[in-house]
Amino acid sequence: MTTRVSPATAYTTPNNYVQDRTKWSGLIEAYRSFLPVSDQTPVVTLHEGNTPLIPAYSLSERVGRGVKVYVKYDGLNPTGSFKDRGMTMAISKAKEDGAKAVICASTGNTSAAASAYAVRAGLKAFVLIPDGYVALGKLAQALLYGAEVIAIDGNFDDCFNLVRDIAHKYPVTLVNSVNPYRLEGQKTAAFEVVDQLGDAPDWLCIPVGNAGNISAYWMGFCQYHQHQKCEKLPRMMGFQAVGSAPIVEGHPVKSPNTVATAIRIGNPANWKRALAVEDASQGEFNAVTDEEILEAYRILAREEGVFCEPASAASVAGLLKVKDQIPNNATVVCVLTGNGLKDPQSAIDHAQAQVKAGVASELESVAQVMGF
Amino acid sequence: MTTRVSPATAYTTPNNYVQDRTKWSGLIEAYRSFLPVSDQTPVVTLHEGNTPLIPAYSLSERVGRGVKVYVKYDGLNPTGSFKDRGMTMAISKAKEDGAKAVICASTGNTSAAASAYAVRAGLKAFVLIPDGYVALGKLAQALLYGAEVIAIDGNFDDCFNLVRDIAHKYPVTLVNSVNPYRLEGQKTAAFEVVDQLGDAPDWLCIPVGNAGNISAYWMGFCQYHQHQKCEKLPRMMGFQAVGSAPIVEGHPVKSPNTVATAIRIGNPANWKRALAVEDASQGEFNAVTDEEILEAYRILAREEGVFCEPASAASVAGLLKVKDQIPNNATVVCVLTGNGLKDPQSAIDHAQAQVKAGVASELESVAQVMGF
């Protein structure tokens, strides 16, 4: 068992002294002046954002040299992922523009967020998926929120082309990541990190799939910097999975493959933007193996008590991979994009712990198993 | 589709104007002066609490007569349920007292919370369950957090007796609901509701299993009232499932049975306390059927965009059952104790929506299915 930092030396989140409690009604209200909304915009919110920035004492010890690591736990958004940040904006603007329905192609976190915010707004939600896609669990949320899920006789590319054509021809708003309001909402995570720390961190470690979130965070840091809300700008450190690392390899990956399904993307929509972020922030893109991702996933749970999606753990796997590059005493934030409860099967498959069964129902037997 | 309240007339959470953003580092720091902690107490926190109080416009319309309904969405705590509130206190105090390990009997939310906070504190966590209990999904969290899960050849009562005996004989702290610090932590949910509304609500609707949470909320409201933090005290409205309603029926239920597993308890530990709360608050206990619970579960998802555990929906099922008793223009808070992601199978089983499969991958076919 890792030794824990004692309370006397433990650091906390600097600006989290509290007192003005729980005064939060969603990120649009919180950051209104930084967002493309007006008094005419109906605010469709589930009080997303305001997610914890948790000190990661064990990760800090693993890095050493006075480095302070935090995790931004965006899995505590209302539908369980950072997608809610973009969706409150996308759906509010769709509602403002008079839309009656929204559509997306997704089998994961986007479909859950789109469905929840759509019903909240009184809009119909359509979700397109490829036929034969069997992982019903991932669609459980969309179905319960009452989205209309349509499985087409084609692949994901066909789904994306269809939703774009449908949004073009019919009065349905597209809320996939091409929707420009998505990144506007997502950038507020950077605002929160600065508000929580009192400045930007030295490094931001983040999983990269479509590269939308790294672009959004950078937008947020730059905007806050322009408004003198922070003095620093972080180095943006993006991490892809080895089997799905087009940006690292410099070319699209035809059949991307990784346990980190939420970043299994072979041809990122925001590729150019991501390279611009790398350049402007003196950042880096690196690839981490599935084994490294799963090890980080377990470390987060077993040492920090934080349960995230496998894809989220790519940021921590990356941190541990390049830790020798981190300057002494630096502040590092690792972004955890989704809740581990989204994928209980991965927890069971990769826990490396098992139930000790068949123990007799008597004190001595149980005590013996416990090591007494 | 239900008509939504237009933005012009929509109410929001009164005290949620924002500004002091995200300044939260857990409920012990936030409510230190109201809790049995000192400067010597190591604070073991995952930044639990500070959960959203979300206006429920559709439920308000269903009740009518100017009644404002909110849901307190405690499923957004770090391990996905309100149990984190009690566990940050129980584990911090265990750590303060020098414990090296904690133990509980649980197959559900308690085991997840105990395991996460224990590893965070550097303590060993033991979880006792009855052998042959097959729902591995519910144990996924405990296993990933690295708890030692021991299945004994006995039933739940045997588990409870054993953990009590073990905690008595060995240096292991019991963190089941008999641990007195659990309710201390849980009462902070009432503080948050008052801080968010500016006063206590007129009614509080809450699911009742062991009756610990209703007792904790009442403690919180009363303590805040004594400190002039609120003018009102709410009527405490507790709801049990028909197949597991010992308090409503006035006698223990031998084999409790309900879809709301988190409140499937035949002989509540806090029974006497619950009756005292009913009396002092002029509250009521009522039973709701599984059908009513599942209907409320769907309404929350399909109309409010909020995904909770079936047991959580008992508070909303109860609200709708006794809605004619609610005074005009009253403010009502329904407590949602757990995240729907804890139980994806229930979502799939009860969504009443299905994937429309086998649609041709062409614009016209999809448009037709969509109703264009």
Image (spheres, coloured by chain):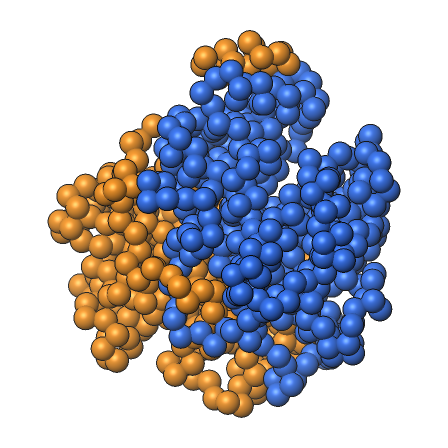
Chain colours: A orange, B blue
Residue B205 x, y percent position in the rendering: 71, 58
Q: Can residue B138 be seen here?
A: no
Q: Residue at x 75, y 52 (%)?
A: B278
Q: Is residue B294 left or right of residue A281?
A: right
Looking at the picture, how far across and down is residue A351, in whole percent? 47, 33
Nearer to us in this view, A350 or A132:
A350
Depth check: give the residue in front, A327 or B165: B165
In this view, the residue in front, A171 or B47, is B47
Name the residue at the left extreme: A328
User: Is B274 displayed left or right of A25 in the figure?
Assistant: right
Q: Is residue B214 visible to us here?
A: yes
**A160, B146: nearer the viewer:** B146
For image coordinates 72% across by 47% down, the residue present is: B276
- Residue B173 image point, x, y percent: 48, 27
Q: Is residue B97 above or below residue A67?
A: above
Task: State which quadrant residue A302 falls in.
Answer: top left
How many callouts does the rendering have?
0
Identify the residue at image location x=57%, y=44%.
Answer: B183
Image coordinates of residue A270 in percent, x first then y, are 36, 68
Relative to residue A64, is residue B261 drawn left or right? right
* Image vertical order of residue B72 relative to residue B108, above or below: below
The image quarter in which residue B162 lies: top right
Which residue is at the far right? Answer: B249
* Residue at horizontal 64 percent and vertical 25 percent from the top: B160
Q: Is residue A159 left or right of residue A11?
A: right
Image vertical order of residue A343 relative to residue A226, above or below: above
Q: Quadrant of the C terminus of chain B?
A: bottom right
Q: Quadrant of the N terminus of chain B?
A: bottom right
